Image (cartoon, rainbow, N blue to C red):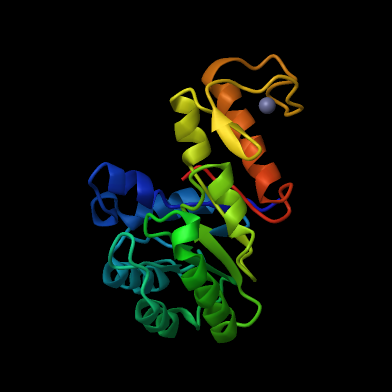
Amino acid sequence: MTWVLDCGTWGLHTRGKRYAERGFADLAAYYRTHSASWRAAPDEYLRPDRTMENWRDWQRLFPDVPVAPVIQYQREGRPSASEVLRQLEEYASASSGVLLISNPGMTAGAWLDHLAWAVAEVKRAVPGVWVHVLGAGWDPVDIALYRRVPGLDSIDSIAYYTDAQRGVAWRLGGKGPGRPDGCPCPACTSGVRGMAALAMHNAWVALQTAGGGHGGSWARA
Ligand SMILES: [Zn+2]
């Protein structure tokens, strides 16, 4: 199992905030006190230049806290090959062993071809690197599609949680209003109740969909 610490960019973005307002010091302190397989650089959603600037600042300020760089796109729904190549020039020297690609708000089917190309480019520029897509997988059907991307190592999703907040239960191949009867997941076979049980159940379905936890890792952003 891979443990991921994310920097909370999506949460900040949805509240209309950015990193500059929060400061890197809090994030560095958080990263120092929690163990993880890797940690995300302080990126900014749909702001590749700010993200690269943050990356450089972080190297200068906290060289003892390695973070994985994040490729960001400029516009929602518009993944750009030239953006990938431009940012790869910056990040090819990163030594974290992981490179992240931030989903520009797309469903898997809409950008699988681009993503397959991008993953291949990243691995060509940084041999042996682990490639992870941030914010991927809106539901089990969407998650399953990411398994078709050659070389993609992992994805994460918050949708299992936001759907649980709305009372939507995931199941293999779809979703519905209630947890399916006879589900063997740890939530359904224990005394956990309410939203927590639904979130656990949905996360379990997500893991099964992604390959039993071996092909995917899941973090609440
Ligand atoms: Zn279940």
Q: Is residue 144 left or right of residue 32?
A: right
Q: Is residue 23 left or right of residue 38?
A: left
Q: Is residue 72 left or right of residue 33?
A: left
Where residue 104 appears, x then y in whole percent? 37, 59
Task: Give the vertical position of 65 relative to 165 (above or below).
Answer: below
Task: Give the vertical position of 140 relative to 199 (above or below).
Answer: below
Quadrant hosting ligand 1:
top right
What residue do we see at 37% from left, 83% from top?
Answer: 86
Where residue 153 appears, x then y in whole percent? 64, 63
What residue do we see at 54% from left, 27% from top?
Answer: 176
What residue do we see at 48% from left, 40% from top?
Answer: 159
> Would residue 67 be visible to someone looking at this image?
no
Task: Give the vertical position of 125 relative to 210 (above or below).
Answer: below
Where residue 110 appears, x then y in whole percent? 44, 61
- Nearer-the-camera pick, 114 or 27: 114
- Nearer-the-camera pick, 61 or 1: 1
Q: Quadrant of residue 61?
A: bottom left
> Would residue 155 be visible to someone looking at this image?
yes
Where residue 205 appears, x then y in whole percent? 65, 37
What residue do we see at 29% from left, 44% from top?
Answer: 14
Q: Quadrant of residue 174?
A: top right
Label tally: 0
- Nearer-the-camera pick, 174 or 79: 174
